[in-house]
Image (cartoon, rainbow, N blue to C red):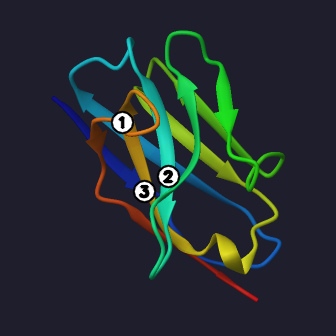
Amino acid sequence: QVQLVESGGGLVQAGGSLRLSCAISGRTVSSYAMGWLRQAPGKEREYIGHIIWSLGSTYYANSVKGRFTISRDSAKNMVYLQMNSLKPEDTAVYYCAAGFPPNFGSWGQGTQVTVSS
């Protein structure tokens, strides 16, 4: 089983940047994709993007394309979400996930991101 722990959330002004980190432990994720999703209050969980661990190829939702970047550090067993040009509508709990998109199989506990206007 894969354990995932997110960190790096916080409060940021609109237009600012944040980098979220996800520490991976337990089972290897080399055969999986690592995804980021978010859930805003009163809304369904939204897919942001994912990275194919073995290839490093990335995919993004249109809502974040050009602003968010997913990367991974294989040596540290970490995956990152760099978020730039943040908007108030990006406010949500952000989750790291492992498995096969779009549903994935393992989830972290989430980290809160709040973007003030």
Tell me the residue that label 1 is attached to.
104
Q: Which residue is mark 3?
A: 7
Q: Position of residue 43 (x, y in %)?
A: 48, 74
CA separation, marks 3 and 1? 19 Å
Q: Is residue 33 left or right of residue 28?
A: right
Which quadrant is the C terminus positioned in? bottom right
Q: Secondary structure at mark 1?
A: loop
Measuring 38% from the left and 12% from the top, which residue is drawn there?
31
Residue to which mark 2 is pinned: 37
Residue at 49% in and 18% down: 53
Closest to the observer: 26 or 35?
A: 35
Figure check: 2 above or below 30: below
Residue placed furthest toward the left: 1
Which amino acid type is shown beneath numbered disc 3?
Ser
- The quadrant in which the N terminus is found is top left
Evaluate if marks 2 and 1 touch, with contact meaning CB atoms under 8 Å apart. yes
7 is higher (above) or lower (below) than 73: below
Could you give the CA–CA distance between mark 2 and mark 1, rounded to whole angstroms? 10 Å
Between 50 and 22, the one lying in front of the other is: 50
Place of residue 68 in the rendered image (x, y in percent of width and height, measured from the top left): 72, 49
Q: Is residue 105 left or right of residue 38?
A: left
* Earlier sequence position, callout 2 versus callout 3: 3
Residue depicted at x 40% and y 27%: 100
Mark 3 lies on a secondary structure that is strand
What is the spatial separation of the Cα atoms under label 2 and label 3, in whole angstroms?
A: 14 Å
Q: Amino acid at mark 2?
A: Leu
Horizontally, residue 95 falls left or right of residue 24, namely right
Q: Label 1 near label 3: C-beta < 8 Å?
A: no
Decide: few, some or many residues near mark 3? Use Cα within 10 Å; few <14, some 14-19, many ≥20.
some
Q: Earlier in the sequence, mark 2 or mark 1?
A: 2
Of badges 2 and 3, nearer the viewer stands 2
